[in-house]
Amino acid sequence: MVKAVFVPGLLCNDELFAPQVEALRGALEIAIGDHRSGDNFSSMAETVLGNAPEKFVYAGLSMGGYAGFEIIRQAPERVEALILMNTSARPDTPEQRVPRLGLIELAKTHGVSAVADTVLPVILAEQNLGKKGLTDTVHRMAKDTGLDAFLRQQSAIMGRADSTGSLSAIACPTLVIVGDSDTLTPPERAREIAEVIPGAELKIIENCGHLSTLEQPDAVSAAIRTFLEGAGIGS
């Protein structure tokens, strides 16, 4: 069985990938990487690598993608294939830090549930906002993450490196996934990544925002399965 490590995004937990764990059960043995303990991506990558199999498929969504770039820098020989979902290779800009700092203050004063309420219209496609099961999941993940981990994650995100210059050195099979309605890391950011990584595939998921694995779980799982089969991994 092919081993895989999936790393969630900001304020998310293993529920983010629950549909893929189930759908890909026959192809991948998926573990969820620790993305809560570090306040920078170097230490986060070290923690993930320290608990990962010697060889594994890496998948990360949003912040998990940022961690993936660092993991590839630290141990490229261990990553059999790379799956980058709803992420960007660019560093945070001063303009992006303004709302982040606002969310940090909101979390400190009103808790992470208030943050979840605030970001829902940003992270989900408009047509998915009315799905109570989906919004409830977002709230559960935020509550489970908690304030301290949220603050560490935001610190890591704001201080992340510019990965655009190292994309061309990625040698493993790579799949880049993005939602067509993702406003945080839009399709043009995914296209930037896929066009530079040699041989990378780009999959744009329809009717989908930033949380592709939950908004369109079947489409994402199918894209991952097709990619792995095409790369000869697990076949």
Image (cartoon, grey):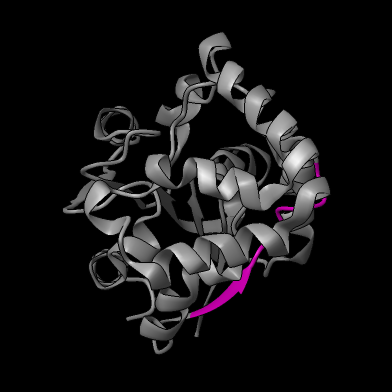
Q: Position of residue 97 (x, y in %)?
A: 60, 18
Q: Residue at x 81, y 44 (%)?
A: 38
Magenta-drawn stretch contains 55: no
- Residue 78 visible from this viewpoint: yes
Q: Residue at x 57, y 61 (%)?
A: 139
Q: Is residue 154 above or below residue 216?
A: above
Q: Position of residue 106 (x, y in %)?
A: 69, 34
Q: Going by the picture, which residue comes out furthest to the front?
A: 110
Indicate left or right for 71 with 176 as reference.
right
Towards the viewer: 112 or 197: 112
Q: Residue at x 53, y 19 (%)?
A: 96
Q: Going by the picture, which residue comes out furthest to the left?
A: 206
Label the magenta part by its dominant secondary structure.
loop
Q: For the image shown, how many numbered marks are present on the structure? A: 0
Q: Position of residue 76 (x, y in %)?
A: 58, 46
Towards the viewer: 87 or 120: 120
Q: Quadrant of residue 81?
A: bottom left
Which quadrant does the C terminus fall into? bottom left
Q: Is residue 152 above or below residue 105?
A: below
Q: Quadrant of residue 78?
A: bottom right
* Residue numbers of the magenta segment: 29-38
- Residue 34 visible from this viewpoint: no
Q: Going by the picture, which residue comes out furthest to the bottom?
A: 26
Q: Residue at x 48, y 76 (%)?
A: 18
Indicate left or right for 229 with 14 as reference.
left
Magenta-drawn stretch contains 32: yes
Q: Position of residue 2 (x, y in %)?
A: 49, 78
